[in-house]
Amino acid sequence: MKKILVLLLLSIGSFSAKAQVFTGMSEVDKSKKEGVYTFVNTQEKYARASWKAYLSKFGKVVEGKNGTYASSDIQIASISDKPLTVVSKVSEENKKVKLFISIATGADEYIQTGHAKLSEASTWIEDFIKIVDLEEGVRVEENKLAELIATQAKNSKQAERLIRELDSNARQINNLEERLKEAKIEKEKILTNQVQNKLDQKTKDGEIAAQKLAVEAAKQKIK
C-alpha cells in the first residue's frame, strides 16, 4: 500500500513538472515557429537575462530585438548528440512572462507534440524554470533585506533627530532655568525696593505733616 502511495505521489509530481511546458506555435521575428513554451515566474527583464545566460551555457547566443534569441549551433547533450538550432523569444502576455522555444533537430523537424525528444526538451526547459525560481527567491530575500535596511536607516535618522530635539529641549530648559533664577533675583530686588519705598513714603508723610505745621506757624505770624 505504501509503495502504491509513493508511486502515485511521484507520478503526480512528474505530471506537475511536465505540465509546465506546452507545445504550440508563436511568431518570432515575423515568422511563425513550431515549438514549446512555458510561463516564467519573474519579471520580463529578469527572464530575458536568465534565459540568455542559460542558453549561453550550451553555445553561442545571438540576441535580437524584442526579447528574441537565436542559436544556430548549440549543444544540448540531454536532447541530441548533434548541434541544434534554437530560436526563442521572451515576452509578456496577459500579465504573464512567456518563454517560447523552437528547437530544430533537423531540416523542417521541430520538437513539438509527438516528437521523440519532447520529454527531454521539457526536462531541459524545466531545469531553466528551477533556476529562475531560485533566482527569484534570492531577489525576494534581497528585497526583504533592502526593506529592513531602509527601515533601519529611517529609524537611525529618527534616533538622530530625537537626540537633536533632546539637546534643543535641554538648552531650552537651561535657558528657562537661568531666566527663572534671574526672575527670582529681580523679584527680590523689587520686594526690597517696595519695602524701601514704603519706608520712604512714611518718612515723607512725616516730613509733609511737619512742613504743614511749619506753614501754619508761618501764617500765624502774619496775623
Image: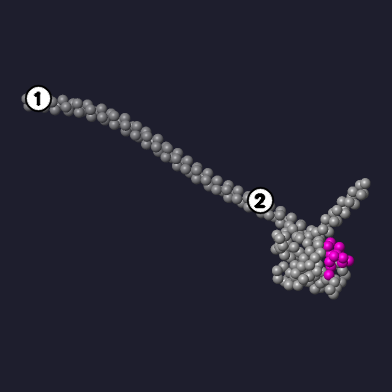
As drawn, the label of residue 141 is: none
Which of the 4 image quarters holds residue 39? Answer: bottom right
Kindly identify the amino acid type of the residue bearing the numbered disc 2. Leu
| Residue linked to disc 1 | 220
Q: Nearer the viewer, mark 1 or mark 2?
A: 2
For residue 183, side relative to residue 168 (left or right): left
User: Residue 84, position in %: x, y?
Assistant: 83, 71
- Snapshot quadrant of residue 133: bottom right
As rendered, which of 41 and 128 lies closer to the eye?
41
Q: Which residue lies at the image location 90% right of the left edge and 48% below the top edge?
A: 5
The structure residue drawn at horizontal position 42% and vertical position 37%, both measured from the top left corner, is 181
Residue 21 visible? The answer is yes
Q: Secondary structure at mark 2?
A: helix
Q: Which badge, 1 or 2, is on the more N-terminal residue? A: 2
Of the pair 38 and 218, the residue shown nearer to us: 38
Give me the C-alpha separation between circle 1 and circle 2: 104 Å
Q: Which residues are magenta?
A: 110-124
Q: Residue 201's x, y, as percent?
A: 26, 29
Check disc 2 and report the residue beneath it: 148
- Compared with 89, 190 (above or below) is above
